[in-house]
Image (cartoon, rainbow, N blue to C red):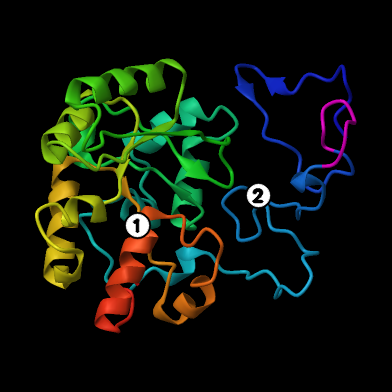
């Protein structure tokens, strides 16, 4: 238990929260998920796992480390590939600086275990991106959404939104533009952003064509194009499947996700499975 007057830092590094404590909250104000988590080591298979979730299977003793393929790449590209080979990248070191309760080795281990990501496209890194992480062992992150519509805003206005999002400490930003010059706007945002930039590629896929005309070639070409621009992460709406459609047709507010509703329409038209799945 952490007592009110107890200092929770050591030198210049803050200690990570207790695991399995009776009451890990600072002033005994209540329990947290940490109250019920297994005691373990960051990077191990049981990190922040809960043993008491009804109906759930026993926690696996395996992590992504155990699934490293034979003949793994000798020239890794992604953070995951580096981590699974035991490498600590410059991006992992920077994440550890920004997550004072973690060391660079712990960041590597969490990435390798599949519980942490560092959304850092190498193209964006060549501009102004300051690497950060999202994961179970990291601090909570906040995303800011922005985007131009066919009737409002443009590249300069979106860059101004980006500056405000960064000023107020958004950890990531999503460009949800649906109108104007999407390509030029996205390019400008990526070149100017110090935070990871995400997109919803299907918004660009349907510019200048009918939704029903989408096929695997078009989908993959747009995603590859945006990756080459420097997009750090993408929303692909893989969760809504054809078998789910009868379950949502009578919902009062329908499918609230624009990308999900577009793909639902595509599935109804073609009578095929979600192409993102």
Q: Is residue 156 above or below residue 108?
A: above
- Sequence-wise, which precedes: disc 1 or disc 2? 2
> Where residue 149 sits in the image (x, y, percent)?
25, 37
Say which residue label 1 marks.
259
Residue 102 in the figure: left or right of residue 90: right
> Where residue 2 sits in the image (x, y, percent)?
85, 30
Q: How many marks?
A: 2
Say which residue label 2 marks.
41
Residue at 56% across, 51% down: 43
Residue 67 in the figure: left or right of residue 124: right
Which sits in the foreground, 183 or 196? 183
Which sits in the foreground, 152 or 42? 152
> Where residue 135 sits in the image (x, y, percent)?
52, 46
Predominant SS along the magenta part: loop
Which sits in the foreground, 106 or 191? 191
Q: Quadrant of residue 195?
A: top left
Residue at 56% across, 39% down: 138
Q: Is residue 269 above or below residue 181?
A: below
Secondary structure of the residue carrying numbered label 2? loop
**Quadrant of the image for the N terminus?**
top right
- 76 part of magenta stretch: no
Q: Is residue 275 visible?
A: no
Residue at 32% across, 78% down: 268
Q: Are marks 1 and 2 in contact (CB under 8 Å)?
A: no
The stretch in magenta equals 24-31
Q: Is residue 26 above or below residue 30?
A: above
- 30 part of magenta stretch: yes
């Amino acid at each position: 238990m952490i007592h009110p007057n107890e200092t929770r830092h050591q030198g210049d590094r803050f200690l990570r929260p207790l695991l399995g404590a009776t009451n890990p909250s600072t002033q005994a104000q209540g329990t947290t998920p940490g109250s019920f988590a297994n005691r373990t080591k960051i990077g191990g298979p049981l990190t922040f796992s809960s043993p008491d979730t009804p109906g759930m299977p026993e926690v696996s003793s395996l992590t992504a480390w155990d699934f490293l393929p034979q003949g793994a790449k000798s020239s890794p590209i992604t953070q995951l590939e580096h981590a699974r080979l035991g490498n600590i990248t410059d991006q992992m070191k920077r994440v550890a600086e920004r997550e004072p309760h973690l060391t660079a080795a712990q960041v590597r281990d969490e990435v390798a275990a599949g519980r942490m990501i560092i959304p850092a496209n190498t193209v964006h890194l060549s501009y102004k991106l300051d690497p950060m992480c999202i994961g179970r062992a990291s601090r909570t992150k906040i995303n800011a959404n922005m985007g131009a519509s066919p009737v409002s805003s443009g590249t300069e206005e979106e860059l101004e939104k980006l500056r405000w999002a960064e000023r107020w400490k958004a950890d990531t930003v999503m460009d949800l533009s649906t109108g104007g010059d999407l390509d030029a706007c996205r390019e400008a945002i990526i070149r100017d952003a110090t935070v990871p930039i995400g997109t919803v590629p299907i918004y660009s896929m349907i510019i200048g064509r009918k939704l029903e005309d989408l096929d695997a070639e078009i989908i993959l070409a747009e995603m590859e194009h945006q990756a080459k621009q420097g997009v750090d992460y993408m929303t692909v709406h893989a969760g809504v499947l054809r078998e789910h459609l009868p379950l949502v047709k009578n919902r009062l507010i329908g499918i609230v996700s624009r990308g999900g509703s577009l793909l639902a329409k595509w599935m109804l038209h073609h009578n095929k499975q979600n192409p993102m799945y």
